[in-house]
Image: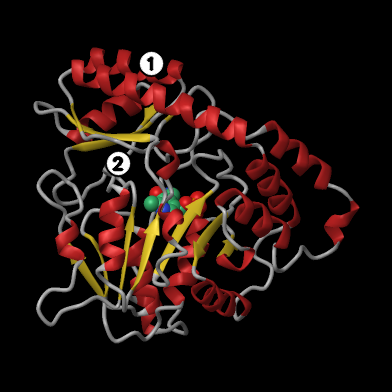
């Protein structure tokens, strides 16, 4: 890499996303996309927005989307921040933590973008081990002795484990850290958890981040948002307007608004994924897999007699892609996206053959 870039850039270990191979004949269960398409109303809105107006800049404030999300969640539009995918929303939140004295606390097994952002922005990190059963222990996130966090972030449900923290436990962490912002990354919450968005009016230090990539089946559109106290949101807007005033394009804005307004489709498509997950978990257990309880659109499983990397490679030979992480404590596990019923049946058949 060029010596003209800074030492920070030379020192980065960037996040490596799951591969996105051509879909022909592949059963792609590696990046937690929704198996069914987005709302037909969202698709129609995107098509309708594909016209001469594309020569104009989009609304820099995304007012229509903020209004739709505020209505959906019973908030004010000033309590919503939107971005180009939740990765970008998170990036803005991390930028808002630049030069903090105290470190950001997060689990040792979690979304691997968090340490990457810390590296990029020079934010101190404290990695908090999960319990033996891979759950987040609330007590570990409460101030201990003289130690307290500058901020806290965790996904709920956690990724890649799928384990859910109850809303009561999330509230204990938020209430126990009144001087630190607590970021709850709810990328997968719609598949079985209670969102902490209901708590944002009560706690000025809570920021809840959502994505349209999973439960709304719009990963290709890149839309995410954060809900929080208006003062927290105002800080994110400042960061955004110092970086890119137009994060969401016209097509994304149109599609996202229509998706939010199609509540019936949203509920039904989440319900289908949850039902398929429960069947999949049962079948995996019947094959001898240990499967962690999942509240997400993926499962995390290991087989007591078979090596995780080997299983992933065997599946790959059969054109089935799942995610395997070469990381301490989880290298025997596979993270498997809940696909269609048909895809899950193909997976189970292949595993039966391999085992
Ligand atoms: N948070 C978590 C926990 C995730 O797993 C992902 C998806 N990989 C994201 C955030 C980012 O999602 P997106 O940028 O597509 O909104």
In the displayed structure image, the side of residue 66 where residue 101 appears, left or right: left
Numbered disc in front, either 1 or 2: 2
Please name whichever residue, 242 or 15, is drawn nearer the observer in this view of the structure.
242
Measured along the vertical axis of the image, is residue 235 above or below residue 262? Answer: below
In the displayed structure image, the side of residue 256 where residue 327 appears, left or right: left
State the residue position of label 2: 162
Residue ID at (61%, 36%): 263
Q: Work out how far the residue at label 1 is from the one at label 2, CA to CA, in angstroms.
A: 22 Å
User: Residue 94 in the image: x percent, y percent?
Assistant: 42, 72
Task: Work out whether residue 238 can be spotted.
Answer: yes
Counting other residues with Cα less than 10 Å from the Cα at mark 1, is it few (<14), some (14-19), or many (20 or more)?
some
Among numbered discs 1 and 2, the one appearing first in the sequence = 2
Task: Please tell me in which quadrant of the rendered image residue 286 appears.
Answer: top left
Task: Work out whether residue 23 can be spotted.
Answer: no
Please name whichever residue, 290 or 343, is drawn nearer the observer in this view of the structure.
290
Task: Please tell me in which quadrant of the rendered image residue 242 appears.
Answer: bottom right
Please name whichever residue, 52 or 148, is drawn nearer the observer in this view of the structure.
148
Residue ID at (36%, 26%): 277
Residue ID at (26%, 82%): 102
User: Residue 212 in the image: x percent, y percent?
Assistant: 55, 47
User: Residue 41 in the image: x percent, y percent?
Assistant: 72, 35
Of helix, strand and loop, which one carries label 1? helix
State the residue position of label 1: 346
Task: Please tell me in which quadrant of the rendered image residue 280 appears.
Answer: top left
């Amino acid at each position: 890499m060029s010596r003209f870039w800074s030492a920070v850039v030379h020192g980065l270990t960037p996040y490596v996303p799951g591969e996105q191979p051509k879909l022909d004949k592949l059963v792609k269960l590696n990046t937690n996309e929704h198996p069914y398409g987005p709302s037909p109303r969202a698709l129609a809105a995107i098509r309708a927005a594909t016209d001469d107006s594309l020569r104009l800049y989009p609304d820099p404030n995304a007012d229509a989307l903020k209004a739709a999300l505020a209505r959906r969640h019973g908030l004010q539009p000033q309590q919503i921040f939107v971005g180009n995918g939740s990765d970008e929303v998170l990036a803005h939140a991390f930028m808002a933590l630049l030069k903090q004295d105290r470190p950001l606390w997060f689990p040792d097994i979690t979304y691997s973008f968090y340490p990457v952002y810390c590296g990029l922005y020079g934010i101190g990190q404290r990695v908090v081990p999960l319990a033996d059963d891979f759950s987040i222990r609330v007590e570990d996130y409460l101030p201990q002795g003289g130690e307290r966090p500058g901020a806290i972030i965790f996904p709920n449900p956690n990724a890649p484990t799928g384990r859910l923290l109850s809303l009561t436990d999330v509230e204990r962490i938020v209430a126990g850290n009144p001087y630190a912002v607590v970021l709850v990354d709810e990328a997968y919450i719609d598949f079985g958890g209670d969102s902490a968005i209901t708590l944002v009016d009560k706690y000025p230090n809570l920021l809840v981040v959502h994505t349209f990539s999973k439960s709304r089946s719009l990963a290709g559109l890149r839309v995410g948002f954060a809900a929080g106290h208006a003062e927290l949101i105002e800080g994110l807007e400042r960061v955004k307007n110092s970086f890119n005033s137009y994060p969401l394009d016209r097509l994304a804005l149109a599609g996202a608004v229509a998706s939010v307004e199609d509540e019936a489709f949203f509920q039904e498509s989440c319900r289908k994924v949850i039902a398929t997950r429960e069947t999949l978990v049962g079948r995996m257990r019947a094959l001898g897999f240990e499967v962690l309880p999942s509240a997400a659109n993926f499962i995390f499983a290991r087989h007591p007699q078979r090596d995780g990397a080997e299983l992933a490679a065997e599946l790959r030979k059969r054109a089935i892609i799942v995610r395997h992480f070469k990381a301490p404590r989880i290298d025997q596990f596979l993270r498997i996206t809940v696909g269609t019923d048909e895809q899950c049946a193909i997976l189970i058949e292949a595993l039966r053959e391999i085992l």
